[in-house]
């Protein structure tokens, strides 16, 4: 009698920072998925929340009897999203039995039934695919943009200008193309639900923890692309993403507070790491020029404010146009 091969091993990493209840909800949605697949372990990393998150999470794991498949790792410092993931992934890859796949999952997500199995099956069926990501959606099932193109001068112009006619002309370069209904190859995926083949890490290394938060998944997908690994959006894997709940940089909260310094630092690092200084200057000029025209149009046409306060000033102060950057204060 032929024995079935063992299920591929999966490591799920969830980085918590002051969102313990969201993390618990995420774990509850994962429970049935883990039981169906087996050979899965989940590690919750607390990024030095300092708000009692560790105790809350420990109590939840114990009260729900999740100890068999969930463990908690509390870090002494908050090095950001990439560093939090690396704290688990690095040792796991060096262990005697490294996982076949690693699933990066945000704490502000709720996993729909079958999401885990679908990503694993897709990667197993397509050995040339290094990274697979879920369809992210709102609670009502409305899809979110989660498959993107790499940033270029033209995408930055479009992001700043926000003019439909120009977006049509630049349709080949816009950052977020129309949301596809079928599985499709893409440049990069939102890191809220991204499953990665072990061999990708072995070939290109861990996430770049010089990115505190944001742009680390763009950087990782670009490095994977240059190492001949493809990246795919798999919409049959569905994950609810409570946008901005864990960071406040996106979602409703984003219009109420200034964009944090680490967003500008990450953007600056991405363009300088992968492009020339001249290219970085040109991308900043493209965004600044486009956004200035958008603000003029916003004023003349009485359009509502949809951006964080002081965005133009903060962007300019952190642009490649200013030597050393970071000229704003009080943040």
Image (tube, rainbow, N blue to C red):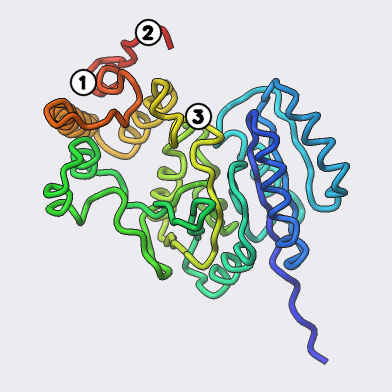
Image coords of residue 171 (percent x, y):
19, 55
Residue drawn 43% across the image and 22% down it: 260
Based on the displayed image, in which of its 4 quarters is residue 301 positioned? top left
Image coords of residue 82 (percent x, y):
55, 37
Residue drawn 44% across the image and 61% down it: 233
Based on the displayed image, in which of its 4 quarters is residue 45 positioned? top right
Q: CA distance from mark 3 to mark 1?
A: 22 Å
Image coords of residue 21 (percent x, y):
70, 37
Q: Are marks 3 and 2 in contact (CB under 8 Å)?
A: no
Q: Which residue is mark 1?
A: 321
Q: Which residue is mark 2?
A: 329
Q: Is residue 115 above or below residue 174?
A: below
Q: Is residue 318 left or right of residue 17?
A: left
Q: Is residue 90 left or right of residue 183?
A: right
The residue carrying pointer 1 sits among few (fewer than 14), some (14 to 19) or many (20 or more) residues within 10 Å by Cα, namely some
Q: CA distance from mark 3 to mark 2?
A: 19 Å
Residue drawn 30% across the image and 16% down it: 325
* Disc ID at residue 212: 3
N-terminal label among 3 and 2: 3
Q: Is residue 184 above or below residue 198?
A: below
N-terminal label among 1 and 2: 1
Q: Is residue 258 left or right of residue 16?
A: left
N-terminal label among 3 and 1: 3
Between 87 and 61, the one nearer to me in the picture? 61
Farthest-out residue, top:
330
Q: Is residue 131 visible?
A: no
Secondary structure under badge 1? loop
């Amino acid at each position: 009698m032929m024995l079935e091969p063992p299920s591929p091993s999966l490591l799920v990493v969830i980085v918590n920072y002051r969102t313990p209840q969201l993390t618990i909800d995420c774990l509850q949605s994962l429970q049935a998925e883990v039981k169906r697949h087996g050979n899965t372990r989940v590690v919750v990393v607390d990024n030095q929340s300092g708000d009692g998150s560790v105790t809350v999470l420990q109590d939840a794991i114990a009260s729900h009897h999740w100890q068999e498949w969930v463990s908690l790792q509390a870090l002494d410092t908050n090095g950001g999203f990439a560093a939090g993931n690396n704290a688990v992934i690095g040792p796991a890859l060096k262990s005697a039995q490294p996982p076949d796949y690693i699933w990066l999952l945000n704490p502000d997500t709720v996993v729909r039934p079958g999401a885990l199995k679908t990503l694993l099956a897709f990667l197993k069926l397509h050995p040339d695919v290094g990274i697979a990501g879920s369809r992210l959606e709102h609670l009502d099932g409305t899809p979110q943009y989660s498959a993107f193109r790499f940033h270029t001068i033209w995408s930055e112009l479009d992001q700043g200008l926000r003019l439909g006619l120009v977006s049509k002309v630049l349709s080949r370069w816009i950052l977020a193309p129309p949301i596809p209904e079928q599985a499709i190859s893409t440049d990069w995926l939102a890191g809220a639900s991204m499953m990665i083949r072990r061999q990708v890490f072995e070939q290109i290394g861990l996430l770049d923890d010089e990115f505190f938060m944001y742009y680390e998944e763009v950087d990782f997908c670009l490095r994977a692309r240059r190492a001949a690994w493809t990246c795919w959006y798999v919409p049959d894997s569905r994950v609810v993403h409570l946008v901005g709940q864990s960071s406040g940089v996106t979602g409703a909260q984003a219009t109420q507070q200034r964009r944090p310094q680490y967003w500008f630092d990450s953007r600056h690092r991405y363009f300088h790491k992968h492009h020339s200084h001249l290219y970085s200057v040109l991308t900043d000029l493209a965004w600044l020029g486009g956004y200035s025209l958008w603000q003029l149009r916003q004023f003349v046409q009485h359009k509502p404010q949809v951006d964080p306060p002081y965005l133009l000033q903060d962007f300019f102060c952190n642009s490649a146009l200013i030597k050393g950057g970071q000229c704003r204060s009080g943040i």
